[in-house]
Image: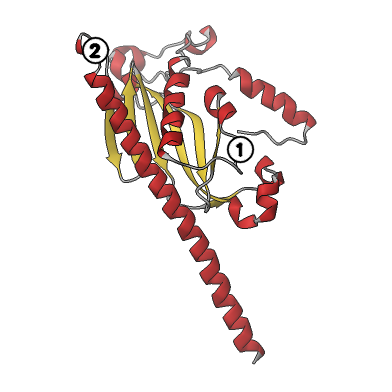
Amino acid sequence: METDQLTTDLFRAIFEKASLKQNVYDNTYKTFSVFKSVIKQLAKEFQESKLYKNSNITFEYKNRGEFEVELKFAGDILIFIMHTNVFEFSRDHEVMKLPYIKEDADRSYCGVINIYNFLGDSFKYKRINDLGYLIGRVFINKDNHYFIEGKRELGQLYRRFDKALMTEEAAHKLITSAVSYTLNFDLLTPPYEEVKLLTVQQIQTTLDNMKIRTGKRLGFKFQADKEEEEKAETDGGVIPK
């Protein structure tokens, strides 16, 4: 009898955990579909605007597959990538301290959409050593609530996990904020010491194929990163993203 009860409890636990993760996945997938729709609509609006008609500036939507979408504009590319797995936050994460999570631990399970920024020329000239930067990641839970970890505009605006419901309007605001941040995230010249040496092999190749990495902050740290590291030293070593 005890064995039967243990088996029943095990099956119930499997069903409940699988159902929870499926619910989170479904919400994340729907959110990603909304992202695609919003990006596509923004590209259409840009191309129909008076500004676009007399210029060669691009603002283009590209579907890279079921779980990836690309937005190209003004020499930059944003790539949105939905992870197919569901994650839970570590016990040390700030989210786990929220009353919203303490009331229902299942709310801490989230799907993730990562937002990366690349230089357009990195893809155009196939510079495979160039770097992209994670500028934000969006977490969506079973309640279809979301919050964002990220830099500047992204990281500062969307922290109310208990209140923020993912809608088309929220997706639009998030994506336009990502574009705004990227426009102000400029390419800096790399430190002299990192580029002062060049091999014969490198100089004999074309500039397009040079094995010299290019990145917006190559050799530099975000000011926010420095501040976070300093804060982590006093908070027990946990560095927020």
Where does residue 174 sit, x and y in percent of width and height? 46, 31
Q: Residue at x 70, y 36 (%)?
A: 238
Location of residue 56 by image quarter: top left
Pinpoint residue 188: horizontal percent, then vertical percent.
48, 11
Q: Quadrant of residue 231?
A: top right
Q: State which quadrant residue 63 falls in.
A: top left
Q: Which residue is mark 1?
A: 160
Vertical side of 78 occupied by 3: above or below: below
- Where 64 falls versus 141 (above or below)? above
Residue 215 visible from this viewpoint: no
Residue at 69%, 26% in the rendered image? 229
Q: Residues within 10 Å of mark 1 (few under 14, many from 20)?
A: some
Q: How many marks?
A: 2
**Residue sticking out furthest to the bottom:** 1
Q: Residue at the far left: name it.
A: 53
**Precedes in sequence: disc 2 or disc 1:** 2
Q: Which amino acid lies under the numbered mark 1 shown in the image of this protein? A: Arg
Would you name the residue on which mark 2 appears?
50
x, y percent for residue 210: 34, 18
Amino acid on which the number 2 mark rests in the picture: Lys
Q: CA distance from mark 2 to mark 1?
A: 37 Å
At 64% from the left and 92% from the top, the residue drawn is: 1
